[in-house]
Image (cartoon, rainbow, N blue to C red):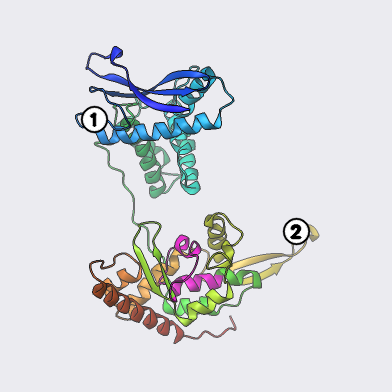
Amino acid sequence: MKIYIYCDATKINKQGNMPVMIIVRNNKGRFLVNTGLSTKEKFTGREFPKSDKNRKAKTNALGRYLLRVEEVCLNNMELDNKRLKKKINEEVFAKSSNKSKTFGDYILLYQSRLTNEQTKSIYMQTYKRVNEFDASATFETINRDWLERYQNHFSSSLRKNTIAIDLRNIRAVFNRAVDDEITTKYPFRKFKISSERVAIRDLTVEQIAMFRDCEVAPWLEIYRDLFMLDFYLCGVNSVDLLMCKKLTNGRFIGKRKKTGAMIDLPVEPEAMAIIEKYKGKDWLLNPMDNRRNYRTFDLQWNKHLKKIGRMEKVEGKDGAKKKCVYYPLFGDAFQMTTYVARYSFASIAASIGVDRETIALCLSHSWADVTDHYINYDRKRVDEAVRKVIDYVNSFREDRSL
């Protein structure tokens, strides 16, 4: 099977643009698929000519199309070319002969191309709300007034930041559609997405000590202990902690998945004790040994952190078995998550005089990367700050009679 580009100079429009086609050649013959992209200058290969307007965006779109076309072809080799072409048009280019596409259809198409499951679920929520508000919406009917009405419609039932997420998702679909030349409409030029600052959730040093020393059911210990490990490692993001395979020369070294920034942290005895307790075979920590994806444990971890505190067994209704009722250590209103470790480390470090630049280094927000001299100097500052914070927490020993 071969897939390549063809610029059809026999179909130049009034603006002087010719359509960019994809040719698929296999053992059943060949066929052409219109990408919806166009060019004024004929080219071969996979990059639009320098003279083309929006060259970078078009080249990126073409690259995505070629990959998706190849994927559809490889996954549907049993189809004849007529049905294969139809499937490519429907799955790659959102073309359907039996109905016109709504904006909701394009959200689903955009969502289907994402790889992160959590992001996909967020787009699905946006899709449901867009359909609830205006199921017949299209690129042509969505304008500034539509966006304002959408915002007002959900203002009484959703948080401002949830609406902002929806609007950013809608904008992302528009950006992709403009790049792919599906539409020239763009209602966000004069529309500002507003959101509100979320209060940072952090614990005091006394509360961190209380959490560390809180007695819990045996099955909850791992969630309490790994939270403390996270704290001792400056609140490193859970994905970076769970996806770590091993320590390097006794240090926690890697790159942040979120930003690519360097992570280089000391593993103090308090942290090492927890690592040894939950040591994995193929990973640093054993919760990952039988998982393909960190996210399943991460979700459990955040869920069960909210159960750490006091527990009571209460009688079930109509003679049913007793059930456990959990009373979170810091109340129902406090949203206990792994991020709290990060915020708390930074807050406690600041409270004992660690300067902001060093705190930023601890959080892997920045690292000097010019010479080894600066790297070693920064590492020393981080090591001293981490030890100082842990010693401060250790000075608070909670009475276990909670």
Q: Which residue is mark 2?
A: 317
In percent of width and height, residue 327 lies at 59, 68
Q: Which residue is mark 1?
A: 49
Q: Which mark is residue 362?
A: none
Q: On the picture, is 92 further left or further right than 186?
A: right
Disc 1, SS: loop
| Position of the C terminus by quadrant | bottom right
CA separation, marks 1 and 2?
A: 73 Å
Q: On the picture, is 14 further left or further right than 31?
A: left
Q: Residue at x 23, y 30 (%)?
A: 49
In percent of width and height, residue 68 lies at 45, 33
Q: Residue at x 28, y 15 (%)?
A: 9
In percent of width and height, residue 245 lies at 50, 65
Disc 2, SS: helix
Numbered range of the magenta stretch = 224-250
Point out the residue furthest to the front here.
Answer: 27
| Crowding at mark 1 (Cα within 10 Å: few <14, some 14-19, many 20+) | some
Q: Is residue 131 visible?
A: no
Front residue of 370/303: it is 370
| Crowding at mark 2 (Cα within 10 Å: few <14, some 14-19, many 20+) | few
